[in-house]
Image (cartoon, coloured by chain):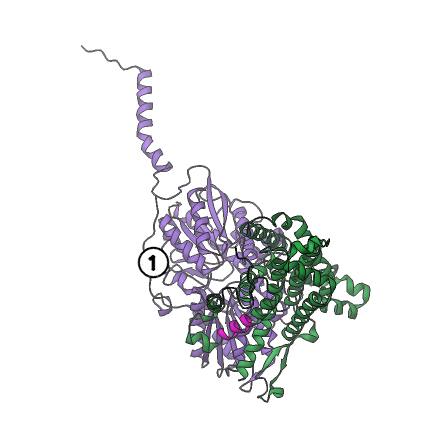
Chain colours: A purple, B green
């Protein structure tokens, strides 16, 4: 006969120890071996907002940061909810992301690629940011997108308009909601043909970096397709402040249209210099001389003052749109900050919501789950009409706005007017289009 | 030929700004021996004097227009400048329109005061320190001034137009026998060139034909001997610092309609102006002016289509290329004097 040593107390102790032992690997996995970078382990999740806070685009960066803060408030159930109320996906409940309260850290890109990478790296490694959003330059976007791919976090680009961002430099972990140079050109060409005719000679001044090159290539191809001739394309250094020596030769070139492939301070200065030379009052080849600015921004239009009057360009979004999503966002932003949002603010706000929504639908923060949820995702209610995040290159496809400098503005924000909402079908292109050739999307990288 | 004339005009206009800034830099270096990296920031402060006066004239009161709405759908607030209320709509709008020329008067006392305060408050403590220390402290000061302006005015450029009567361009073609519109140039830039020539002439006349100027020139040549004669040369040099600041400030005021002022505009000019000073010859006032115009014209020609297609990128390096060639062939610059910045 044997005597059992089992007691009720001993059984409980053994069970507890065995349970703890079995649970330990799971705990460690969730905490530090979750299989992806910066897996949130507490009650909060941290987003990284990387925007220009110093340097020439600081105003644009400030507006992006305002919108990102607003997005975080709305995600956490504060404020009036903004576009959460109009977004076609109803996965977001205003209780954070996957039940975790959203917090954020911000970095300063300084609109310099190396500084932007350093601030994004710091937010990922020191602050535990699981997603990076923002920026006002394609050079910066391409640099930060590459960093995020390597680090295993999602990059939701801000204002970046170069074809390369979702072309030769596309990455699986990167997503662009903003439109691109090709789309601007495709939207502008028919409007330019209607406004100025098909027998035109265009002279291009182009900012000498990735955005300028792809923008010029796109608009030249689109205008040549409607019958325009490209007389010349002069690359101008990004650091230029006075464009008079580039504009003076335009007068004697036989061109009757000046295309300014410039953005930001370059655009403000080159447009102002062109107006100084009285180009718009000249007649060349029996036609009125015209100026085209392919990419507009409200903040830059304000900087150019009266000089934008009557000048045609394009935008990703504008606060004057009357769909329910745009009205909701403009109201939230306007009541909080006392001014209408810019299109860079809009794209950053929307990108933050789209990321959060993708996490909710995927049921995870794992970048590969988020990528899968965003690829070929169709949505509406975020201000641009029915939109698709194409899986092949992570580019959003939606309507594009053709804008014109307003002749009689009624206040400081009333600088541009919407000429046409170009339907999405007109600006779509195949993923293997030559202007987007080269580079591979690759596979999502969860990091860790 | 018409293209060449246009680029010469362009070069004269660019050279005007370089020459005015370089003149101020050389005055400070020649009198006080200080390498002033804050001089570009003084140019920027001058431009913001024009912005400030324009904003002062535009201070408005609000009335509600119930018939119109703002972007949030609220009744529109109509802003009317006080100057229009006080002096009548015509006089009020004329004051706003002429704010840049009026800012010349507004800026002179302000810029002289800034110069004197800068010299007495900070730079005088660095006279006997190495040039590297002077460069560091004045560069730091420039960054502080930039950030102060950015804090109050934002980072965006602020449009500050010339008076309506000076907008548009002047057609030289009929005078030169060319086809109409082949040689046109913005009126304000022509005014800028004339204004610069006037200021440069006034500074030279002041130094050449006044007792004060004579003492300053003597002090620049031999500071100790002038001091031994019982003249307070330090005080005169402080005033010269103020005058140099006023020259750069006036250059900035008049430049405001050419490029909308932003907090960074001083830095854009600073490096080029130093190259101008070095090419002209450290401490040489005529050298600074001559090099300013020379490099302005060369830069303008290097930006032509012919130049950029023949040698891609020449527009970005021409000034530095010429500087290298001149310093190799004439190590003291075009009009530099022996013993200046030489140990």
Q: Quadrant of the C terminus of chain A?
A: top left
Q: Which residue is mark 1?
A: A441
The residue nearer to you, when weighing A421 against A207, is A207
Instruction: Tell me the SS state at disc 1.
Output: loop
The residue nearer to you, when weighing B102 against B117, is B117
What stretch of residues is rendered in magenta? Answer: B294-302
- Give the x, y percent position of residue B58: 72, 62
Residue visible at 52% across and 60% down in the picture: A383
Residue visible at 50% across and 74% down in the picture: A259
Image-based side of B115 in relation to A169, left or right:
right
- Give the x, y percent position of residue A411: 66, 64
Circle 1 marks a residue in which chain?
Answer: A
Q: Is residue B187 magenta?
A: no
Image-based side of B232 in relation to B306, left or right:
right
- Give the x, y percent position of residue A368: 35, 49
Q: Quadrant of the N terminus of chain A?
A: top left
Residue visible at 73% across and 61% down in the picture: B212
Residue visible at 42% across and 76% down in the picture: B310
């Amino acid at each position: 006969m044997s005597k059992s040593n089992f007691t009720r107390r001993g059984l409980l102790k053994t069970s507890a120890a065995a349970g703890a032992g079995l649970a330990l690997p799971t705990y460690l996995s969730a905490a530090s071996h979750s299989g992806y970078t910066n897996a949130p382990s507490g009650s909060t999740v941290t987003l990284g907002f990387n925007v220009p806070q110093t340097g020439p685009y600081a105003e644009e960066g400030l507006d992006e940061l305002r919108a990102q803060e607003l997005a975080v408030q709305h995600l956490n159930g504060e404020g009036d909810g903004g576009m959460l109320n109009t977004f076609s996906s109803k996965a977001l409940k205003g209780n954070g992301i996957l039940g975790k309260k959203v917090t954020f850290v911000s970095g300063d890109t300084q609109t310099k690629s190396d500084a932007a990478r350093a601030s994004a790296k710091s937010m990922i490694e020191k602050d535990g940011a699981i997603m990076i959003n923002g920026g006002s330059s394609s050079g910066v976007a391409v640099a930060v997108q590459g960093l995020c791919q390597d680090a295993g976090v999602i990059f939701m680009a801000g204002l970046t308009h170069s074809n390369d961002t979702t072309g030769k430099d596309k990455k699986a972990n990167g997503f662009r909601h903003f439109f691109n140079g090709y789309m601007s050109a495709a939207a502008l060409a028919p409007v330019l043909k209607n406004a100025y005719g098909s027998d035109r000679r265009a002279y291009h001044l182009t900012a000498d970096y990735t955005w300028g090159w792809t923008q010029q290539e796109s608009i030249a191809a689109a205008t040549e397709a409607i019958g325009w001739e490209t007389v010349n394309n002069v690359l101008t250094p990004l650091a230029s402040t006075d464009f008079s020596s580039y504009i003076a030769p335009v007068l004697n070139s036989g061109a009757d249209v000046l295309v300014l492939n410039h953005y930001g301070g370059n655009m403000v200065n080159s447009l102002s210099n062109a107006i100084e030379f009285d180009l718009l009052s000249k007649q060349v080849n029996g036609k009125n001389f015209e100026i085209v600015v392919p990419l507009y921004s409200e903040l830059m239009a304000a900087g150019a003052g009266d000089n934008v009057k009557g000048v045609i360009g394009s935008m990703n979004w504008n606060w004057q749109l009357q769909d329910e999503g745009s009205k909701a966002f403009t109201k939230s932003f306007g009541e909080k900050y006392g001014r209408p949002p810019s299109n860079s603010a809009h794209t950053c706000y929307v990108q933050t919501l789209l990321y959060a929504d993708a996490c909710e639908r995927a049921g995870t923060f794992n970048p590969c789950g988020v990528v899968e949820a965003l690829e070929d995702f169709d949505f509406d209610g975020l201000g641009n009409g029915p939109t698709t995040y194409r899986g092949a290159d992570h580019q959003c496809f939606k309507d594009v706005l053709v804008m014109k400098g307003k002749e009689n503005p009624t206040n400081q924000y009333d600088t541009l007017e919407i000429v046409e909402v170009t339907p999405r079908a007109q600006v779509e292109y195949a993923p293997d289009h030559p202007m987007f050739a080269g580079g591979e999307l690759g596979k999502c990288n969860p990091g860790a | 030929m018409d293209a060449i004339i246009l680029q010469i005009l362009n070069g004269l206009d660019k050279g005007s700004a370089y020459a005015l800034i370089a003149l101020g830099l050389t005055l400070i270096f020649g009198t006080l021996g200080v390498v002033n990296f804050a001089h570009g920031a003084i140019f920027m402060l001058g431009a913001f004097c024009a912005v400030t006066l324009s904003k002062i004239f535009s201070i408005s009161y609000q009335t509600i227009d119930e018939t119109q709405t703002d972007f949030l759908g609220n009744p529109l607030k109509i802003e009317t400048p006080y100057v229009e209320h006080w002096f009548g709509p015509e006089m009020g709008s004329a004051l706003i329109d002429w704010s840049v020329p009026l800012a010349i008067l507004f800026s002179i006392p302000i810029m002289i005061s800034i110069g004197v305060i800068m010299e007495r408050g900070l730079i005088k403590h660095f006279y006997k320190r190495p040039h590297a220390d002077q460069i560091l402290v004045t560069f730091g000061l420039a960054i502080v001034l930039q950030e102060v302006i950015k804090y109050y005015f934002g980072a965006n450029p602020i449009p500050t137009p010339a008076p309506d009567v000076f907008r548009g361009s002047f057609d030289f073609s009929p005078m030169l026998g060319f086809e109409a519109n082949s040689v046109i140039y913005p009126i304000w830039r022509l005014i800028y060139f004339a204004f610069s020539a006037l200021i440069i002439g006034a500074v030279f006349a002041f130094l050449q034909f006044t007792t004060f100027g004579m003492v300053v020139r003597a002090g620049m040549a031999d500071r100790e001997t002038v001091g031994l004669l019982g003249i307070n040369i330090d005080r005169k040099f402080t005033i010269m610092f103020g005058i140099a600041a006023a020259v750069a400030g006036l250059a900035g005021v008049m430049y405001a309609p050419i490029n909308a002022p932003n907090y960074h505009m001083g830095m854009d000019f600073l490096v080029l102006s130093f190259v101008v000073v070095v090419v002209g010859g450290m401490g040489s006032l005529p050298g600074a002016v001559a090099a300013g115009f020379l490099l302005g014209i060369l830069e303008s020609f290097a930006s032509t289509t012919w130049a950029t297609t023949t040698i891609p990128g020449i527009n970005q390096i021409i000034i530095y290329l010429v500087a290298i060639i001149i310093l190799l062939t004439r190590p003291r610059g075009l009009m530099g004097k022996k013993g200046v910045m030489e140990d």
